[in-house]
Amino acid sequence: MRAQFFLCLACAALAISSPAKEISVFAAASLSDALRELAGRHEKATGDEVRLNLAASSTLARQIKEGAPADLFFSADEAKMNDLEEAGAIEPGTRQSLLGNSLVIVVPTDSALTIASADALAGAGIHRVAIAEPQTVPAGIYAKEFLQKIGRWEAVNAKAVFTENVRAALAAVESGNAEAAIVYRTDALISKKVKIAWEIPADAGPHISYPVALVKRGKNPAGAKRFLALLKSSEGRAVFTKFGFVMQP
C-alpha cells in the first residue's frame, strides 16, 4: 500500500510539473465543426490542449493586432491574412492557402420558396435576407461582391439583416428571423433546419480562399506547428472534405 501511495504521489507531481500545453487557435466561424473534430483528435494524440477562438475573421485579425495571445490564425479570406502579414504579425514562411468554399442561398427546410437564381432575393416574395456584415466579415464581403456583380446589391441591401458572422446569418434563417440567407455551402450542410435553395455557380461566384499561418510571438509555437501539420495532413484534409470544404492544390 505504501508503495502504491508513493507511486500515486509521484504521478501527481509529474502531472503538475508537466501540464498540458495550450495551443491558441483563432479561426473563422465557418471552420467551427471541422476544427472541433480535429482539435479533439490532436488532443488525444499529443496531450496538448487546443483552445479555439471562433469568430468573424475580421474580429480575430483585429484581436491579434491588438495583442491577443494567438498561436495560429485560420482566416476565411486572404485580405485579413494580408493585413496581419503587412503588420508583421505572421511568422514568415508559414502561410498557406489551404481550403476553398462556395456560396449558397438557404431557406428553412419547410419553406415553399422556389429560388432559380439570386434574382429571387430581390423579388417581392422575400422580405428579409440574412447576410454576414458586408464591410468586414468575409462571408458578407463575398456575398456583396457577387450581388454587385449581378446588379442586385441595392435591392437586397434594402431588405438585408446583417449579422456578426456567417453562422449568425445561418441562425437567422433557422430561427425564422429571415426567409433566406447567403452563407457558405459548408454551413448549410451542417444544419438540419435549412436547405440549399440555390448554389452560386463556381464560375460566377467569388473566389473563396482560407489561408492559415502561425502568429508571431505565440506562446506555444512548437504546439502550433504540430497542429498546423495535422491540418495539412491527409487526415486533416479528409476531415475538411467531410464537412464540404474544397482542398486547395
Image (tube, helix red, strand yellow):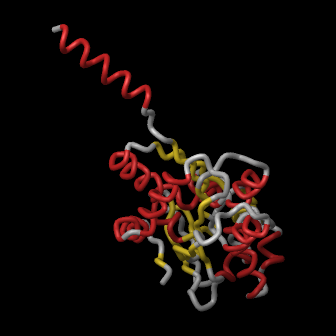
Q: Is residue 15 above or below residue 121?
A: above
Q: Residue at x 45, y 52 (%)?
A: 36
In-image side of 1 versus 225 (left or right)? left
Q: Residue furthest bottom?
A: 203
In-image side of 33 versus 55 (left or right)? left
Q: Residue furthest left?
A: 1
Q: Report the front residue among 212 and 214.
A: 214
Q: Report the front residue among 74 and 104.
A: 74
Quarter the N terminus occupies = top left
Q: Residue furthest top?
A: 2
In-image side of 205 versus 122 (left or right)? left
In-image side of 126 versus 236 (left or right)? right
Q: Residue at x 52, y 55 (%)?
A: 224
Dividing the picture into quarters, in which one does residue 232 lie? bottom left
Residue 8 on image: x %, y % = 27, 18
Dividing the picture into quarters, in which one does residue 108 lie? bottom right
- Is there any visible trace of residue 222 in the rendered image? yes
Q: Report the front residue among 138 and 16.
A: 16
Q: Residue at x 51, y 71 (%)?
A: 196
Residue 126 on image: x %, y % = 69, 69
- Is there any visible trace of residue 180 in the rendered image? no
Residue 71 on image: x %, y % = 60, 53
Q: Is residue 84 above or below residue 65?
A: below
